[in-house]
Structure formats: C-alpha cells, structure tokens
Image (spheres, rainbow, N blue to C red):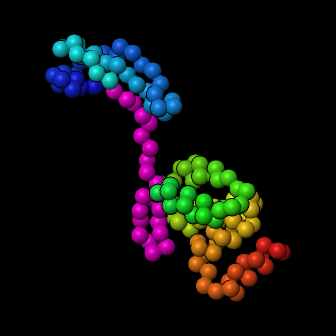
C-alpha cells in the first residue's frame, strides 16, 4: 500500500478490525519512511451483473428497479420480498431480464397470487382484459 503522504511503498499494518457490518476491514497503517499514519478499507470486489433487456440492450443490474416492481405489486398485500439473493447466487455475469422476471413471478405465485398477477400484468405487458383472464385461468387450474 502506497503512503498517501510521501508515496513510499513500505508501510505496515498497525491495527485491523471489521467495518461496515463485517462487509469490509478497516486497517490503520503507518509509513516506514515518514512515520505518518492513515486508514484504509478493504472490501470484496463484486462483479457487476449485466442484464440483457428484451431488445438485446445490455445494462448494469439495478436493484431499485426490481424492488420498485415488487413493492408496487405487493402494495397492501401481506408479502415480504427477500428472494433477490437467488439472482446473485446464480454466479452469472450476464442474465436476461426475462430470467429475472420469471424468477420474481415464480416466487410471487407461491407467496401471493394477487401480487403475482399485478407483477405479471406489467412484466408481460398485458394489453387487455382477456390477457388478465387467461392468466387467472392458469392460476385457477
């Protein structure tokens, strides 16, 4: 680690402790050349997930988008949403928006059918009442 004061490469760690809810390590360091102390933080580097949209445009995964969809689908419904880790545990660098949408709908179908239909209506872009009716008939079978 380079000293921010003199630029020397020779530094030593004086103290280490967990930081940010155990998601990082805080280290106090001292430069062997100028004896100044400074703090560094060490975190695990996460590889961003790229989402392949329906029109084949790629964009970085944005957690807030899926949260917004789930929250609005579950509005005034007795549902909690804690299944996003499944997306990250797939260990994929790229994932289609279709896969994400299907994962969410699969979980919502088991948790709350009203929330499922709400989410599906936006995700699958229902055009009319007949599309709703078809989806409801699938659920009733």
The residue lying furthest to the right in this view is 141
Q: Residue at x 56, y 57 (%)?
A: 67
- Please report the residue visible at 30 percent of the width from the left and 15 percent of the height from the top: 12
What residue appears at the point 64 percent right and 50 percent down from the top-left corner? Answer: 82
Percent position of residue 11, x then y = 27, 18
Left or right: residue 25 versus residue 77 is left
Please state the horizontal and vertical placement of residue 122, each as a whole percent of the image.
59, 73
Q: Is 15 above or below relative to 48? A: above
Looking at the picture, tell me which residue is in the foreground, 16 or 90: 16
Residue 46 appears in the figure? yes
Q: Position of residue 97 (x, y in %)?
A: 53, 66
Question: Which residues lie in the magenta part?
Answer: 40-61
Describe residue 18's horizontal placement relative to residue 107 as left or right.
Answer: left
The residue shown at (15%, 22%) is: 6
As for residue 46 lying within the magenta part, the answer is yes
Pick the quarter of the image with the N terminus: top left
Can residue 106 be seen from the camera position used here?
A: no
Q: Is residue 80 above or below residue 98?
A: above
In which quarter of the view is residue 24 placed?
top left
């Amino acid at each position: 680690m380079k000293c921010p004061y003199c630029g020397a490469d020779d530094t030593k760690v004086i103290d280490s402790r967990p930081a940010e809810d155990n998601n990082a390590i805080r280290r106090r360091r001292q430069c062997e050349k100028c004896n100044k102390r400074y703090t560094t933080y060490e975190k695990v580097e996460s590889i961003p997930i790229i989402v392949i949209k329906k029109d084949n445009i790629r964009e970085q995964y944005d957690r807030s988008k899926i949260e917004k969809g789930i929250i609005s689908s579950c509005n005034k419904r007795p549902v909690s949403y804690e299944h996003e880790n499944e997306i990250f545990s797939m260990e994929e660098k790229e994932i289609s928006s279709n896969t994400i949408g299907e994962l969410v709908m699969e979980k919502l179908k088991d948790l709350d059918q009203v929330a499922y239909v709400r989410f599906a209506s936006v995700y699958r872009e229902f055009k009319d009442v007949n599309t709703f009716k078809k989806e409801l008939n699938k659920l009733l079978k």
